[in-house]
Amino acid sequence: MQIGGSMRKDIVMDRYPEISEHGLIGDLQTAALVTTDGTIDWLCCPRFDSPSVFASLLDHDRGGHFRIGPDRDDYVSRQLYFPDTAILITRFMTPDGVGEIVDFMPVVEGEATDRHRLVRLLRVVRGTMRFRMEIQPRFDYGRKTHELQLYDDGVLFVADDLTLTLHRADMPGRSLHEEGTSLDRDGDGLRITKTLREGEIAGVVMESAGGRPTAVHPQEVVELFNDTVRFWRGWLSRSTYNGRWKEQVNRSAMTLKLMTYAPSGGLVAAPTAALPEQVGGERNWDYRYTWVRDASFSVYALLGLGYTDEAATFGEWLKDRIQEQAGDASGPLKIMYRIDGSSDLEEVVLDHLEGYRGSRPVRIGNGAADQLQLDIYGEAIDSVYLADTHGLQVGHEGWTQIADMIEWLCEHWNQPEEGIWETRGGRQEFTYGRLMSWVALDRAVRLAQQRGRPADLSRWITERDRIYTEITERGWSTKREAFVQNYANEVLDASLLLMPLMGFVAPRDPMWLSTLRAMDQELVSDSLVYRYDPSASPDGLRGTEGTFSICTFWYVDALARSGRLEEARLTLEKMSTYANHLGLYSEEIGLTGEQLGNFPQAFSHLAHINAALNLNFQLDHGPGWVEPVLSAGQRER
């Protein structure tokens, strides 16, 4: 029985690719994951947070997939991005030839739309290749049936609230036989085989809300490719960063852009749902929403790279959320929203799905949405302050709403809360929440003083200083000689690596250097950083987790500011070896270097950009700079 169970587990594992074996494409309203064997195993349509069309990543049999590859098994595949773009190329090498799939989504700018196109261009660069295409959509996470309608120029997949059109792209005026193509129904899906010779191109365009299939000339697909290249290279050319690790920073920047919902400016935490923090475990969350925290931190990265327009767009998104005050138990702000700014995120378990490599439950929605996490107010106001230093000033109405929010914080900063890590084990007095409440008040005081805004400065300064005193007294453990996670335990927490970056402590303060040494010994494993020890601070969930990539990038910055520049540089270089073959990061790194959690992770990529920006500056100017590096750079110019 035990042997049979082991065999069953091996079979389940083998049916799923590694999380890292994916590339990301998108059109700024939704995104797809493409495996190194040419399978699209995740796509939600028409938005990031819409139900899935392809989700074999979460259930090999029921999820649905769109695979293109050689019609044989003896091949080797490689994957890369077309330089300086988000266009993905998957290459297949066989004894008879070398073929490629060029995957991309033409960018949709402007208003939200139900019409999205996924282009899959096939070409052979040497010899010949027979491609096999399998298209098996499963609408609404595999919960809805659909009808297949065949036409001469393609196919319709018709569900009750969404229709996908597959347009064939081939030379006009030729029969399927003359094209070397066979097209067959496969259940309620489709199987196509096609032979191409060196120099030939063909492909398909899958479109939502696209009507009946029409013949697409291959040259039209090439023009779509060229338009998409121009968009991404034009966007990347606006970056002002020319420091070290430029290529890696550019890839992280494009990844963040791919995860930004253009109509609202909201940044999703990740384009995926329910990828596990521990394979086989229960820590499987839906990250297809905009966290105030993540998006606020992105302002630092965007401004540091010179993308003031994107920072301004998020500023408008944040202003709308502050004005709505949709929060209740969470305060004026909710911790997360849907990408359009709405706040209905009811958590649902999809019992019919197996989960990635058997990792259940599969959750959509997010039950943490109504938690009280005081740190979001500090991150939000800090982003407003940083934007102000770059000429993006808050108007009268916006300042009035901010002042009201600060007044609320003056009354509530000392409450127990769930904290940055969204624990489900009960509220605590988390030091990080207090730290970021201090940041909120400190930045609000600065804005009021520097811009002459009306404010109850006496009260704000008094509360700010009370928080400072409380952290240094109750957040400090004389036993550990370190700042600790919360006032009720002596657990170390990597979120406190932000203390020097936020200006709460001087980078050479003995209390901080002692805290950093304690973290070195307990949270750091060969440069990778755990966020905390779940066994020492129960978070209400079973299982373990890997090291958190964002914490490792925070560690880089903390090392640099504390004068340990060589260690900081080596840590960043080591961390780059844990990126996947395309330079993408998930949320966590496992014991054997595997990527874990939702993928790719915005938090990881924005922290990567910030670490590179800050370390590059420290290497050029010397360690210990306390003010935000991007503001310092602005002053020097």
Image (cartoon, rainbow, N blue to C red):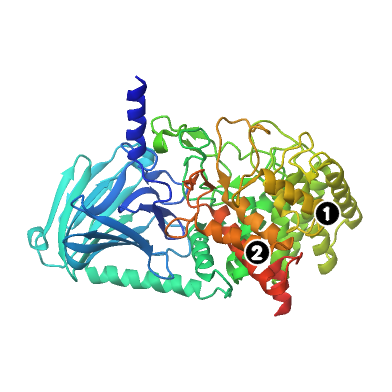
Query: How many neighbours does mark 2 have within 10 angstroms: few (below 14), some (14-19), or many (20 or more)?
Result: few
Q: In this view, does 563 lie above or below 183?
A: below
x 43%, y 47%: residue: 19
x 62%, y 63%: residue: 569
Mark 1 or 2: in front is: 2
The disc, 1 or 2, on the residue closer to the chain's N-terminal end is 1
- Mark 1 → mark 2, Cα distance in angstroms: 20 Å
Quarter containing the C terminus: bottom right
Residue 32 placement (x, y as % from top left): 39, 53
Work out which residue is located at the far top of the displayed protein and give it. Answer: 1
Horizontal relation, residue 163 to residue 444: left or right: left
Query: How many neighbours does mark 1 have within 10 angstroms: few (below 14), some (14-19), or many (20 or more)?
Result: few
Residue under label 1, please give it: 510
Residue 534 placement (x, y as % from top left): 63, 35
Query: What is the quadrant of residue 17 in the picture?
Result: top left
Residue 345, visible in the rendered structure? yes
Task: Indicate the amino acid at tag 2.
Answer: Glu
Query: In the depicted view, which residue is nearer to us: 110 or 507?
Result: 507
Q: In this view, does 429 lie above or below 268?
A: above
Q: How many marks?
A: 2
Residue 288 placement (x, y as % from top left): 51, 47
In the structure shown, which secondary structural element does the residue marked by tag 2 occupy? helix
Query: In the depicted view, which residue is nearer to us: 233 or 525?
Result: 525
Horizontal relation, residue 449 to residue 156: left or right: right
In the structure shown, which secondary structural element does the residue marked by tag 1 occupy? helix
Residue under label 2, please give it: 566
Residue 325, visible in the rendered structure? no
| In contact (CB < 8 Å): disc 1 and disc 2 | no
Q: Is residue 54 above or below residue 125?
A: above
Query: In the depicted view, which residue is nearer to us: 289 or 525?
Result: 525
Task: Indicate the amino acid at tag 1.
Answer: Pro
Which label sits on residue 552? none
